[in-house]
Image: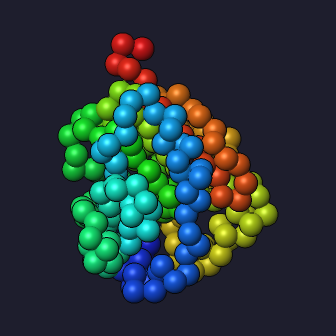
């Protein structure tokens, strides 16, 4: 088990006390770019469910401690890694990843897996910290100092990775905390 997952098991009881609230406006803007109705949502790397509570999403996370917190909130949750989602092909309308993508091992593989479970016209929403900003650079260094195996991206790297996974890239909001969406094109394109 990766240190990141063990650490989040340990941090689970106090996690929500230290994390800022989610930018609900950016999240709603990103979900709105979907080319289909958004009913079935996965919050991958969703931890305690702080985002899933706003979207009605199913929380997917490898850390049992975080999932216990999500279940206490009354949220549906599944223990799994972003590299191997236990959902059928094309079974969800949206996948959101908030403040977690930098913790995912094999980012491109995770993007391909999220594309697999999205239905055509569905949307992937990633909100994460931009390594290209001063604060992003500092956060990258700080997480390495505490032993996390994080991979932070610049905005252009994130957009390129999302595009390489077959999504139509839709920039939503730039800054230290960046939101980029990707729409899965129809199968005939």
| Relative to 167, residue 139 above or below | below
Please identify the quarter of the rendering in which residue 171 is found: top right
In this view, the residue farthest toward the right is 134
Task: Please name whichever residue, 145 or 127, is drawn nearer the observer in this view of the structure.
Answer: 127
Task: Please name whichever residue, 145 or 25, is drawn nearer the observer in this view of the structure.
Answer: 25
Task: Please name whichever residue, 68 or 40, is drawn nearer the observer in this view of the structure.
Answer: 40
Residue 19: percent from left, percent from top:
55, 75
Q: Is residue 162 left or right of residue 42?
A: right
Task: Please name whichever residue, 131 or 21, is drawn nearer the observer in this view of the structure.
Answer: 21
- Kindly tell me whether residue 163 is visible in this rendering: no
Please identify the quarter of the rendering in which residue 92 is found: top left
Residue 165: percent from left, percent from top:
46, 34
- The residue sitting at 27% across, 50% down in the picture is 85
- The residue sitting at 51% across, 67% down in the picture is 149
In this view, the residue farthest toward the top is 188
- The residue sitting at 53% across, 51% down in the picture is 27
- The residue sitting at 55% across, 57% down in the picture is 24
Coloring applied to the structure: rainbow
| Relative to 94, residue 4 above or below | below
């Amino acid at each position: 088990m990766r240190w990141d997952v063990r650490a989040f098991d340990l941090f689970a009881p106090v996690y929500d006390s230290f994390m800022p609230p989610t930018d609900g406006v950016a999240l709603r803007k990103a979900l709105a770019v979907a080319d289909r109705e958004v009913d079935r949502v996965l919050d991958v790397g969703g931890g305690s469910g702080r985002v899933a509570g706003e979207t009605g999403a199913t929380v997917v996370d490898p850390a049992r401690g975080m999932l216990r917190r999500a279940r206490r909130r009354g949220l549906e949750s599944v223990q799994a890694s972003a590299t191997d989602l236990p959902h059928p092909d094309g079974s969800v309308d949206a996948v959101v990843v908030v403040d977690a993508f930098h913790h995912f091992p094999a980012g491109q593989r995770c993007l391909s897996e999220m594309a697999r479970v999205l239905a055509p016209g569905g949307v992937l929403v990633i909100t994460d910290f931009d390594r290209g900003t001063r604060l992003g650079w500092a956060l990258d260094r700080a997480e390495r100092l505490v032993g996390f195996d994080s991979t932070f991206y610049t905005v252009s790297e994130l957009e390129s990775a999302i595009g390489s996974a077959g999504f139509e890239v839709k920039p939503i909001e730039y800054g230290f905390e960046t939101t980029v969406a990707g729409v899965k094109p129809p199968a005939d394109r």
